Amino acid sequence: MSRTILPHLTALGLICVGTTLATAGVPAVVKPAKNIIVMIPDGMSIGGTTLARWLNGGDKPLAMDDLACGLVRTYPSDAIINDSAPAGTAFACGITAQTGNIGVYPDALNMPGLTQPKPNGVNNLSPAANIMEAARLQGRSTGLVVTCELPHATPADFAAHDPSRKNYDNIGEQEVYAGFDVMLGAGQKFFRADVRKDKEDLVAVIKANYELVQDTASMKASTAKKLWGFFEKPGETDLGYDLDRDPAKTPSISEMTEKAISTLSQNKKGFVLMVEGSLIDWAAHANDPVGITSDINAFDKAVAVAMNFAKKNNDTVVVVMTDHGNSGITIGNASTTSGYDTTPLKAVVEPLRSATRTAQGVTDLINADRSNIAEVAQQYYGVALTGEEIAKIKAAKDLPELRSRCQSVLGSRMATAAKLGFTTGGHTGEDVVFHAYDPHGTRPTGVIMNTDVARYLEKVLRTDLDAVTRRQFQLAVRAFTQKFASVRTDASQPGNPMLVVKKGSDEIRFAQNKNIALVNGKPVTLSGLVLFTGLAGGENWYVPADAVALVK
Ligand SMILES: [Zn+2]
């Protein structure tokens, strides 16, 4: 009842959705907007958010605070705690996905309250369209901004389709050919011919289609409409933590967000941008409260940039929500069981403020013979290590182990000093805060499912994700044989199978993970990706409708 009167009241400007008129969830009527900015602080538990606010002084809100309007249930199709791959798939595609999967329908669907018909019918692990694919069909521009490697789970969810988040070869290739306008992040290595199984030089493909920038100044100076950034330090595959960043070489997440918005907003039809504060999650896995809070604050500055644009532009929806909790970080721990109500603010914030680098950032200052561990821990993290702790860190067999031992020792000392608790080094399954800005007031409220986020954004875009799935991921073998063409898979090129379609004297070849058809050897650009995925034999190829139309 209340939902039916929403459009009328909204038109009169009388409504504040989420108070008394609307029931919880996605409003039945959502007003369209031109642009969407999706912001994901990966693995951000609310304890970390509260702590980040206190570290700013506690007297002013975070940029995201103003937008808080509900809670998100985060579980995947087959477990109580989510991983980033299905968690981001829910936000991007509006489906409940399975542990490890990127943008595909689950094989197992055994959590309560889940039913989801597959628009394509027959095949588990078949692709589900994401909001980026829907937006591009409408002529909107699309972009990704992340602080990890671009083929990592969350960006992959908004760009690719694969049963395994670990399959960087497929994911990276799909990202290159998906049709994005702006891609800012890290992980050039995974696009290199010498690293990829198929030996394709995707860096060359990127350079042919985008301006490739690799430091802050070149990013800011670029006037390219198609912009790609790899900002990792040599030997790394991610941007590193904001606190440890060299601002000349590595742009901040807010600088990347600003650049992405200014580039994408040149399209009069609008844009969809996804921004991920990727390393909040990694610091949480490491139980490093300094990394968690400093990267939350860096992410929040990017929210401020997005909100600044959204408020000026008045036609942009911004949603901010993490994909799952991580680490169980709490203000208060076993030491405050007695005395929690007399713990002063400074007991918590002062130890944290004495750190000027994250625990990983401290590790990176350890010299080759590891003789300065005590000095750098004291100087940059404010912690006086014991002899035993120094010996433990020193005995690490390689750099990854040095980092993990240093993070573990320093993080644990900081947690004790600042009276913080951690319950796990993994993700957690509680609900998370949903934040949204909708200039037209029709934002979701109450306790929603993670899939509801995409279903709301689909309404904002005036699209239909299931219809886009049916259009973009047609069962190729079936579609082509119905047109009396012969179909076979050419697996002669390792890592790059091709679908070969023949009718009469015409031959069309489709390479997996690309948006290209070779019609009698001549390239034709398709509206979306050609995919090879799924469980059912013979039904594994998916092509967009315009690929099917190439066979007369
Ligand atoms: Zn995550």
Image (cartoon, rainbow, N blue to C red):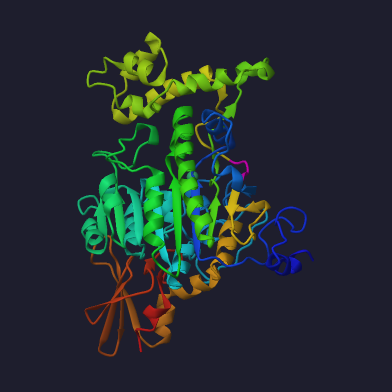
Instruction: Name the one closer to the observer, 126 or 409.
Output: 409
Q: Main secondary structure of the magenta part?
A: loop
The image quadrant of residue 545 is bottom left
Does the magenta run of residues contain 236?
A: no
Residue 56 vs 143, above or below: the answer is above
Residue 302 lies left or right of residue 63; in this view the side is left
Q: Position of residue 488 (x, y in %)?
A: 32, 76
Q: Residue furthest top?
A: 387
Is any atom of residue 69 visible in this view?
yes
Relative image position of residue 431 (x, y in whole percent): 63, 44
- Tag count in the figure? 0
- In the image, residue 422 sits, relative to residue 279, either above or below, namely above
Where is residue 549 drawn, in percent x and y?
38, 84
Q: Position of residue 99 (x, y in %)?
A: 51, 50
Extreme residue toward the right, this view: 1
The magenta span reads 429-433
The answer to which quarter of the image holds residue 390 is: top left
Residue displayed at 35% across by 37% down: 240
Q: Is residue 177 or residue 442 the one in the foreground? A: 442
Q: Is residue 502 above or below residue 499?
A: below
Residue 340 in the image: above or below residue 184: above
Identified at 58% across, 47% down, the residue is: 79
- For this orientation, the residue located farthest to the front is 312
- Quarter occupied by the C terminus: bottom left
The image quarter containing residue 464 is bottom right
Residue 214 in view: no
Q: For the point 35% across and 85% down, which residue is it?
A: 551
Q: Quadrant of the N terminus?
A: bottom right
Residue nearest the viewer, comparing 140 with 9 = 9
Residue depicted at 57% across the width and 35% down the height:
60
Q: Is residue 522 left or right of residue 412?
A: left
